[in-house]
Structure formats: C-alpha cells, structure tokens
Image (cartoon, helix red, strand yellow):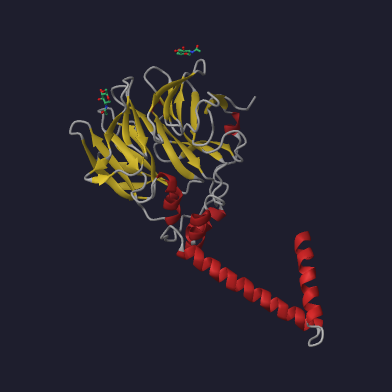
C-alpha cells in the first residue's frame, strides 16, 4: 500500500503541472488514468502473445472432479520422522526392502545405496549413473531400477549393472519411472511420458495430454509389451496381494486406476481412487496388512485446479516454472489405501517443516521407511507412535 501511494502521487502531480493551462486537474487525472489503463492493456496483450507464442506446450484444459477440502483431517504426523543417513542419501526417491534386510534407496547422485535399519549405516552399494527412480525387488533377489535416463536396470552384487530393456514393441521407452514384479518374475513398469522427458516432467502435467504407458517385460521371452497407454503421467505401480490386478497412479489426474490382470474383468481398467489431494507418486503394497502406501507430492489447491483448467495459465507456468509454480512442493503427505481404494490413514507435514515431497514408503518391522525426491535422508516413522517426541 505504501509503495503504491508513493508512486501514484508524483505521476498525477506531473500531469497536472504540464496540462495546467488547457484542462482542469480532475479531467487530466481521468485522461492520465485512461492512458495508463490503455498502456497496461497493450503490454498485457503483448506479454500474453509472447507467452503463448513461445510456450513449450500445446495444452488442453483439464477439468477435475471437485476437490473437497478438508480431504482428510489435517495432521502433522509426518513431522515425527527420524532421519536416517542424513547427508548420505540425497533425494532417495524410492525405497525397497532387500533380501538381506537392508533398505535399498535410489539417490539423485546416481547411486543405489543400502541403509541398514539397525545401526543407520549407509553403504554405497552400486553406482548406476543416470537418475534412478522406482525400485523393486526381483525374484532372484536382484534390485530392479526404473531409470528415466537409461531404461530398466538389473542391479545385483555383480560389478556389472545390466539394462534389461529400453524398447517396447519397437518404440523407445523414454521415461521409466516405477516398477513392480510378480511372484513368477513378470516385470510391470511405467513409462511416465512418451513425449516429455525427465527434466520436463512438469510440461507433461501442464499440457494434460496423456502420454503415459504401462509396460510388461516377460523374462521367459525377453520381450517388452505395451499393456496400457494414454495414461496421465504413469507414475507408481503395484500389484495386488493375489496379483489379480495392478494399481497404476496417474499423477496429473490425481488418481490411481486398477487394471485387471485376471478374472471376469481381465484387460479392463477402472478408477481405484481419485480426487487425491496431491499428485500420486510411488505406490507399494504391504501384503500383511493388505494396504498400499502412496506418496502424494505437490499439494493440490484451488490454484492448481484453476491452472489445469486454463490454457493461458498453463502456458504461463510452463514458461516460468523454474521461477513460479502453482504446486506446493513443500508439503509432504503419505496415505495408506485398502484393497477397495479407500483411505485408511494419512500422515502429513503440511508445511514441509520436517519432511517435504514424500514420494513413497515401505514397511519393515512396524516402521515406515519414507523416500523423498528432495530430502537428504531416508525418513523413518514408528507406526505405533502417537505423538512426536
Ligand atoms: C551396520 O549393520 C550392518 C548389518 O548388520 C553391518 O553389515 C554393518 O557393518 C554395520 N555397520 C556398523 C558401522 O556397525
Ligand atoms: C538380473 O541379473 C541376475 C544376475 O545375472 C540374473 O540372475 C537375473 O535373472 C536378472 N534379472 C532379470 C530380471 O533379468
């Protein structure tokens, strides 16, 4: 307010002096007002034309189911996390439990590391390079890594890191993101977008054109086939306890779908859970409790919904994303979902006070181990803990 008042005064003063002989001060102020408004309109039009003409996306407006706030009661349970391996595991996007009981994480510096839960020691296990994202435990005890820059990788105690596949039915796999394995060794993984690459993932969100796929690598034939396509940024993927369906999370539709692999509805897709309060990321099954654990990133708000609805705002944010974004990436939230797609618990850190950008979690020995794309540690939460100490 102070600034505006100060700036306004000298302008009208100057106008009044120069036009003092021809018009009354009041009409001059009016004319000056019209000039200013016209200038603002012209500049806005030029700016808008520039933004649209140079925008990197070709967006379509996306109207989502109405977001209900509060979605589940806000809490701060995620602020109770303990930090494991602080400074040694940078951006552990995903976490899985290995056969030896260690927690395997994929970090932003291109490593697959082991965090030992008893003593918190971090072991630099294998360097894979690239930008390892989703992880899964293979049937031979190997760690499968979805790397958007390299393909689907097989990491074992051997020195060599092998690429399992980087094409599907003759098309390149451009954005391997998350992976899950059946008891018989069938590998299901997501290819988040066939259009926008890793560092431009936000453009896929803003464009709202579905370029995501689910692929299946069959180890008996060595072939990779396309199971689903036209998904809205295919992110986390998990199998049901009896392996009769897959849950696949479509980030920018704020939902996860269920794809039937067996039974009456085999080959069909339906909504599993929608209208989520953040972009769904990695999802992992915890078989003993028959629950899926899902990380939600980029808190949803009226502004994100408005942005996804408006082509102009999409162009604007696509262009200036690195300076301004409508999403709240500070917020951390993890939810557990039952087999019917209902939320049973939510752990939140609304302002990212201790844990931001929670991308997924696994359970081991009554502890939840939580990954994040931005935190420099692996989070651990005692599931019995009621309050932070
Ligand atoms: C931590 O525990 C693991 C597994 O038991 C062990 O291999 C490792 O040497 C331990 N690290 C330290 C520093 O004690
Ligand atoms: C990963 O590599 C190991 C060791 O070579 C092998 O036994 C296993 O079958 C491989 N897994 C896949 C899915 O290719």
- Does 310 sit above or below residue 112? below
Residue 344 vertical placement versus 30 (above, below): above
Relative depth, front residue between 249 and 34:
34
The residue at the far bottom in this view is 22
| Picture residue at 38% right of the left edge, 50% below the top | 196
**Most extreme residue toward the front, as rendered?**
18
Q: Left of 215 or right of it: where is 24?
A: right
x and y, in percent, of residue 320 in the image: 53, 55
Which quadrant of the rendered structure holds the N terminus?
bottom right
Residue 133, image quadrant: top left
Q: Can residue 353 be seen in this view?
A: yes
Answer with the quarter of the image where residue 209 lies. bottom left
The residue at 28%/22% (across/down) is 140
Residue lying at 76% horizontally and 68% vertically, measured from the top left: 8
The x, y position of residue 382, in whole percent, is 54, 24
- Ligand 2, by image quadrant, is top left
Along the line of sight, which residue is nearer the eye, 75 or 378? Answer: 378
Q: Work out whether 365 lies above or below 304.
A: above
89 horizontally vs 165: left or right: right
Residue 1 seen in render: no
Residue situated in front as seen by the camera: 80 or 45: 45
Residue 127 screen position, x and y as percent: 39, 27
Q: In which quarter of the image is residue 168?
A: top left
Give left or right: position of 368 versus 126.
right
Q: Where is residue 283 in the image (x, y as percent from the top left)?
A: 41, 36
The C terminus: image quadrant: top right
């Amino acid at each position: 307010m102070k600034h505006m008042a100060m700036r306004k005064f000298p302008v009208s003063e100057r106008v009044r002096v120069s036009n003092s002989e021809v018009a009354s001060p009041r009409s001059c102020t009016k004319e000056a007002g019209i000039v200013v408004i016209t200038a603002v309109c012209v500049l806005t039009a030029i700016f808008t034309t520039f933004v649209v003409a140079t925008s990197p996306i070709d967006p379509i407006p996306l109207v989502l189911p109405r977001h209900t706030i509060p979605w589940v009661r806000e809490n701060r349970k995620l602020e109770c996390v303990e930090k494991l391996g602080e400074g040694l595991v940078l951006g552990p996007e995903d976490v899985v439990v290995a056969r030896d009981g260690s927690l395997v994480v994929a970090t932003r510096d291109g490593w697959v590391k082991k965090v030992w839960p008893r003593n918190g020691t971090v072991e630099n296990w294998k360097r894979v390079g690239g930008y390892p994202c989703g992880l899964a435990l293979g049937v031979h005890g190997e760690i499968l890594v979805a790397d958007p820059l390299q393909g689907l990788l097989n990491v074992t105690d051997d020195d060599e890191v092998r690429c399992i596949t980087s094409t599907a039915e003759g098309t390149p796999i451009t954005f391997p993101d998350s992976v899950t394995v059946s008891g018989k060794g069938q590998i299901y993984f997501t290819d988040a977008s066939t259009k926008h690459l890793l560092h431009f993932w936000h453009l896929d969100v803003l464009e709202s054109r579905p370029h995501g796929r689910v692929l299946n690598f069959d180890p008996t034939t060595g072939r990779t086939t396309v199971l689903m396509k036209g998904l809205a940024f295919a992110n986390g993927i998990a199998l049901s306890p009896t392996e009769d369906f897959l849950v696949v999370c479509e980030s920018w539709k704020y939902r996860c779908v269920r794809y039937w692999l067996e039974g009456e509805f085999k080959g069909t897709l339906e909504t599993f859970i929608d209208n989520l309060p953040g972009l769904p990321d990695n999802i992992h099954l915890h078989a003993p409790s028959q629950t899926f654990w899902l990380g939600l990133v980029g808190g949803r708000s009226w502004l994100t919904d408005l942005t996804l609805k408006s082509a102009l705002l999409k162009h604007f944010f696509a262009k200036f994303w690195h300076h301004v974004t409508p999403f709240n990436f500070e917020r951390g939230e993890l939810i557990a979902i039952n087999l019917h797609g209902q939320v049973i618990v939510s752990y939140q850190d609304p302002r990212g006070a201790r844990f931001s950008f929670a991308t997924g979690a696994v359970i081991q020995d009554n502890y939840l181990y939580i990954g994040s794309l931005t935190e420099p540690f692996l989070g651990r939460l005692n599931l019995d803990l009621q309050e932070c100490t």
